[in-house]
Image (tube, rainbow, N blue to C red):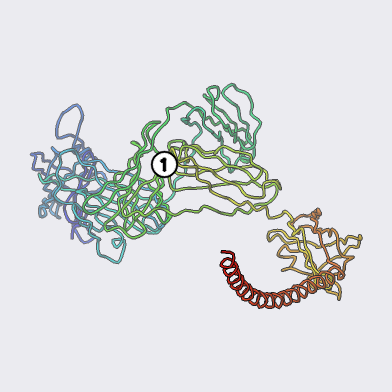
Amino acid sequence: MLQYIPANKIIEVVQEGEYTFGVQEELEDPLIETCYYEADTGQKGVFDIQPPSRRSLDQRAEIFNIITTLGIKGLCQIQVMKVDDKGPNKWMLTPAYFDEEQNEIKMDTIEFSVRFYYKTGILRSVVTILDGSGFFNHLITPEGVELESCELKVNDMVIPLDLQGADTVKGADITKNIQALGHGLCGFKYTNGLYDEVNKLMWTLTAKSKKGRYYRNEFKTRVNIDSGLHHQTRYVVLGTAVTIRCGVPITQPFCALYNPQNQMIITEDCKYSISSFAFHHLGTWKCYSGSDDALETAEYTVTYQARDDLTVLPIVEETTNALRVGCRVIGGSGSLSKCTLTAPNRRPFNVRLGTATDRYLTLGTDFNKGVCVIEIQKPLLSFEHGYWSCNMIGPNRIKYGGTYLKVGRAKPPTYTKRSTVVTELNKTLTVHCEVPYTTDYCFIISPNGTKYTNEDDVRINLGQCSFTIQQTYPSDNGTWMCTYARKTGIPNENIIVEVVVSDILRAYPNIEVDAGNNAQLLCNTVGVPLAYCQFTAPNGTIYHVRKEDSTTDLRYYGKGLERGECGISLIKARTEDSGPWRCAVALIRDEKRTEIAANVMLTVVPPSEINVAGLGIGVAVALLVVTGGVGFLVYLRWRRRRHQVIELGEDIEMRSDTISNSSSESRH
């Protein structure tokens, strides 16, 4: 029985593409020696299984629908190349063979139909994703074309897609992660793409218009991409901080950097920081990067051009079923290379054209136009309400900055106003603060009052303020402060950062105990293990202290040397223990065992002072009680006496009046 090619006798071809159709005999079939063919466009002919003949269906300058018979390959098949919409829609093919008497026997005529597809645009012809992530893609049909239906073909499966809704395809295989894109687009989004499922996979999208025309395009998915740029152009704003990066910083064993004046810049790894980019810095920077695998060095160039300042504007657009949030850059080069949207719960989203999840879709993102958005399905989840942040990066890692977006029911944002950073001596220290609003400037103030300028003026739009020192000193230990400018009339806001230099030795400097009581002396790092612990008494006696050792007079005090604590407990401290005690330690990680020390001043109060003080207090209390008692008795007696005196006085007055009256009467 003859095999049909294609098996269903339906030929599918895309504009300017090619197709092959025909038959192939099985072992039990007669050997085909001649093939007759005829098309509905009027072309017909016959060919033997012998060298091919070629001709075209028309004689236009650009030849289309080129027919090639494949008799030379022993096949009753025809190949048609460079197909357009004027080609045949139907083919009739009749195989023939000769019997033993050399009579030609024609077999049954086979009808092949041709389904022609107009080639149309597609969002991405190659989709690159990370293992486990998602993407979306759709056809881009000519303007004005209204679609009637859409389907996806992958792994020999044909899957219908809803143009208006967002129905999830039901299935247990690859189809379980496919969801129709909707929005009137012939496309879909795919979630949880695994390497074994989508790597090097071909996807075909087909759309049918309301006028009956078919449109088709295909794309390929893969997981890895490797690109390197030897010559780059970057745009900068004059007066801002810029870091020159050239070559391949991670793999190059050495690199030589030259400025636009062809002067060699002494630097490590071709990285050079400029605090204020000036006019003479513009131009082409060149570097020669070495490799372990080549004798010659590779040349890289970075050309810096001045650009105008730019503005990042928020985007919050609401539809019936979704909310679109993001930002748009105005000015500069106007294009993007990266964009990050961060939800109110601080979960970041790496926005790229064509990516998707169950709830989010990057439809509308256009890096060429400086637009970065995601579409969120309604209703919003609780963590999606609040303040989102959008951060944008332009071509060649140019920082555009960002902005904040108020989405849904936004409560006043909460943020950290005091934090702690632990570092070590001689290490790089970065003091970083962040507030949920845009500000014009920010300063960083060190513990000794030195004021530093924010090193990243672009990210200040997102309330981020930072400064980095390359080498940490003991003086950097303490309270740092970021001070933010706010609206006119509102005082600056201060964010506190406590910097703890872990390998600085700390001590409690002044200890006072009564004679006969125990005295605890302690010095410590912040969790950095100690190699040894040693105390020197005021009289010069040295004590080597371990946690395991103890005596009747002195024992270890603290959580252990492995936790960075060196301390002693003096049992029944004596007055001769008073004075400066020197605590000395060395860090385990320090191979040279460099000793670091701190002093603790101990004061032991003598017993005599304690007794005299106690006696004085007792006598004073006793005198107070006695004096108070005596005074109270005197007061009572005085009051009683006064009462008697008052009564006697009144009696005397009465008597005096009587005597006076009598005298007066007698005088008159």
Which quarter shows the C terminus?
bottom right
The quadrant in which residue 488 appears is top left
Given residues 506 and 613, the one toward you in this image is 613
Residue ID at (57%, 46%): 481
Q: Position of residue 182 (x, y in %)?
A: 22, 52
Q: Position of 597 compared to 235: left or right?
A: right
Q: Which residue is mark 1?
A: 402
* Residue 305 in view (yes/no): yes
Asked whether 467 or 636 is in front, the reply is: 636
Quarter location, residue 175: bottom left
- Where is the N terminus found, in terms of image quarters? bottom left
Residue 5 visible: no
Task: Give the residue drawn at x 79%, y 70%.
Answer: 556
| Amino acid identity at mark 1 | Gly
Q: Position of residue 297 (x, y in %)?
A: 60, 33
Total residue callouts: 1
Q: Secondary structure at mark 1?
A: strand
